[in-house]
Amino acid sequence: MAKSRVVFVCQDCGSEQSKWIGQCPDCNAWNTLVQFAQPAGPTAARAAAGRRGYAGETATLRTLAEIELADVPRVPTGFEEFDRVLGGGLVPGSVNLVGGQPGARARGGGGPGGARGGPVGGPLPAALGPGPGRR
């Protein structure tokens, strides 16, 4: 049986290193490398798993020209710059992850769905939650 090899994986960016070092060379985070034992050599199951999607179907590569783009109607938020970043507004049924400095506009209610409300004065349906590291 082949000997398993040891890899060190960064918990911030997922980068793999062959030995432990204090700082990840890819994302520059300190003390984020964790040791894992990796089976030696690619097995047939591992090789096949790399070619499958989440539901187990075989993924196929397509060129950008082969992908059909649908023009989806968007709902403007009433915030001109936010609408510009989103490509014209929110897509109904979509989920948008918005990041920023901790505490920025969270207490003031100035963001979408906040106290200022949406484009017609009523609040936009939104779910706000803390990001990583917040409890």
Image (cartoon, rainbow, N blue to C red):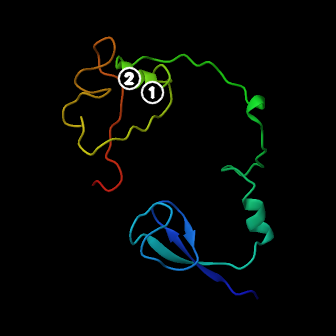
* Image coordinates for residue 33, horizontal then vertical, percent: 46, 72
Q: Residues within 10 Å of mark 2 (few under 14, many from 20)?
A: few
State left or right for residue 91 relative to residue 122.
right
Which residue is pictured at 66% across the width and 83% down the height?
A: 4
Which residue does the numbered mark 1 point to in the structure image?
85
Pick whichever, 15 or 50, lies toward us: 15
For the residues labelled 1 and 2, say whether their Cβ atoms are less than 8 Å apart.
Answer: yes
State left or right for residue 9 relative to residue 115.
right
Could you tell me which secondary element the residue under label 2 belongs to? helix
How much space separates mark 1 and mark 2, taking CA atoms?
6 Å
Q: Quadrant of residue 64?
A: top right
| The label number, if any, that marks residue 81 in the structure image | 2
* Image coordinates for residue 90, horizontal then vertical, percent: 46, 24
Pick whichever, 63 or 27, lies toward us: 27
Image quadrant occupied by the C terminus:
bottom left
Looking at the rendered structure, the kind of residue marked 1 is Val
Which residue is pictured at 34% across the width and 48% down the height?
A: 131
